[in-house]
Structure formats: structure tokens, C-alpha cells
């Protein structure tokens, strides 16, 4: 059943797997919480025994449970986002990277835009598939509130490339750019000017 399965998504570019140590750490944390009596899979060992493409950008999907795993390698192309708006998530949580994302996907489907900014108790969290960063034109900031503390987010904070701060829904329009970051998207790879953002008032007007 999907609720007992988890997923790691790793970037493969020209034969090199990126930041495997961050994914392994999340794997360890997941096993510690859900499968504490089981031996943790070694991503490095598994991938070293796998024939990997040597040219191009690929997404490695590592789906696992307590005792088994499934690996697939898919060509990757960055999605184009023309519009983004806010969606309330209520009391939803997603602190571990479950394979089952149906609740998140359903919320996205209900939005009038290509992509969404999930709002929880008035605070900015994540998009439907990435952590978020916001720029004032000088620095990049990521919300202290998040649904999933992604590997890219953790790394960029450690490297000092982004800063953490509370971001309320009403703060969004004070920034110039919105960025999406995840294992496949490093800082700067997917940036939306603020005019791609549809505010709640605009959404309400369009629905009248």
C-alpha cells in the first residue's frame, strides 16, 4: 500500500548523482521513525550497482518500504510555470516523503493556476513539489514554516546561499521573485517574477 511507501528523488546529470549524502540521511531518519528494526538501504551501494546514463539530466526515483525498493530513471525537463497562487492546506502534514501525494495533488488541481503556494495558518510553506524561496532582489529567503524540509533547502541553508525567516501570506507581494527548489532544481533554475503570482483578491475577482 502507498501509505507504507516512501520515495527519494535524486538528480543525475551527465552520469553524476548529486548530493547523495542528504538523501541517505533522510532515508536513515525515515527508517528510524517507521522501520526502526530494519536495516537501512544504502543508496550509494545500490546506485553503484546500477547502470546509469552518462549524458543528460535524469530523475532517479527510489521508492521503498521496510524491506524492498524499486528504482527507475527518467529523463527530466524543468516544468514551465506561468502562474502561481495560494491554497490553504488546513491541518495537513507531510513531514516525511511519502509516495502517496494524493492530498497535495488534489489541492493543486483545485487551484486556478499552474502551481500553488500552500498556506498553513497564514504562513507560507511549500509548492506542490518543491520548497520555496523569495527574493527582494538582494537575498533569497525561505519560510521557517514548511511541509517537508527538503534536501536542497537544507543544503542551501548550510551553504549560506539562502536565509530562513517567517513569511506570511501577505508578505508575498513585498518580494520581487519566487523561486522553487528541490533535488532536481537548484537555486536559480526556476524563478518566477512576482507578476506570475495571483493574489487571493485577484483569484476571488476572477471567480465572480
Image (cartoon, rainbow, N blue to C red):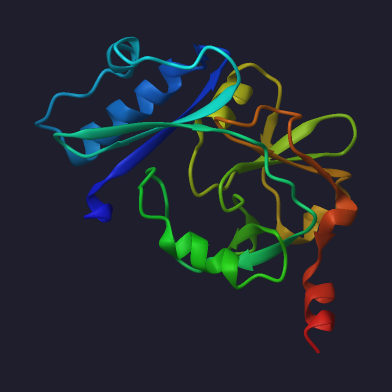
98, above or below 76, in the image: below
Q: Which of 136 and 207 is in front in this view?
A: 207
Residue most extreme to the left: 37
Position of residue 80 measured from the top left corner of the image (x, y, whole percent): 74, 47
Q: Which image quarter: residue 158?
A: top right
Picture quarter containing residue 177? top right
Q: Quadrant of the C terminus?
A: bottom right
**Of 101 and 57, the residue lying toward us:** 57
181 relative to 59 in the view: left or right: right
Residue 12 in the image: state x and y as whole percent: 52, 20
Q: How many labels does the image show?
A: 0
Is 103 on the left or on the right of 188, as rendered? left
Q: At 87% across and 39% down in the image, what residue appears?
A: 136
- Residue shown at 49% from the left, 60% from the top: 104
Closer-to-camera residue (47/162): 47
Could you tell me which residue is drawn at 20 percent across and 41 percent down? 34
Tell me: 122 left or right of 44.
right
Placement of the N terminus among the 4 image quadrants: bottom left
Image height check: is 173 above or below 71? below
Residue sticking out furthest to the bottom? 208
Residue at x-position 42% and y-position 62%: 102
Please provide percent x and percent y for residue 44.
33, 13
| Position of residue 200 measured from the top left corner of the image (x, y, whole percent) | 77, 71
Determine the image quadrant of residue 154.
top right
Amino acid at each position: 500500500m502507498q501509505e507504507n511507501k516512501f520515495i527519494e528523488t535524486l538528480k543525475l546529470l551527465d552520469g553524476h548523482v548529486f548530493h547523495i549524502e542528504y538523501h541517505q540521511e533522510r532515508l536513515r531518519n525515515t527508517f528510524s521513525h517507521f522501520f526502526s528494526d530494519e536495516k537501512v538501504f544504502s543508496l550509494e551501494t545500490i546506485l553503484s550497482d546500477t547502470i546509469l546514463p552518462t549524458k543528460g539530466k535524469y530523475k532517479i526515483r527510489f521508492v521503498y518500504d521496510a524491506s524492498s525498493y524499486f528504482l527507475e530513471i527518467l529523463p527530466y525537463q524543468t516544468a514551465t510555470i506561468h502562474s502561481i497562487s495560494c491554497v490553504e492546506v488546513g491541518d495537513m502534514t507531510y513531514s516525511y516523503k511519502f509516495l502517496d501525494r494524493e492530498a497535495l495533488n488534489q489541492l493543486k488541481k483545485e487551484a486556478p493556476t499552474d502551481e500553488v503556494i500552500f498556506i498553513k495558518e497564514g504562513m507560507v510553506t511549500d509548492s506542490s513539489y518543491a520548497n520555496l524561496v523569495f527574493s527582494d532582489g538582494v537575498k533569497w529567503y525561505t519560510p521557517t514554516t514548511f511541509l517537508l524540509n527538503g534536501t536542497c533547502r537544507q543544503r542551501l541553508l548550510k551553504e549560506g546561499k539562502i536565509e530562513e525567516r517567517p513569511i506570511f501570506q501577505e508578505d508575498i507581494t513585498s518580494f520581487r521573485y519566487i523561486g522553487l527548489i528541490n533535488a532536481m532544481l537548484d537555486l536559480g533554475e526556476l524563478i518566477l517574477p512576482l507578476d506570475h503570482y495571483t493574489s487571493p483578491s485577484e483569484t476571488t475577482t476572477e471567480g465572480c
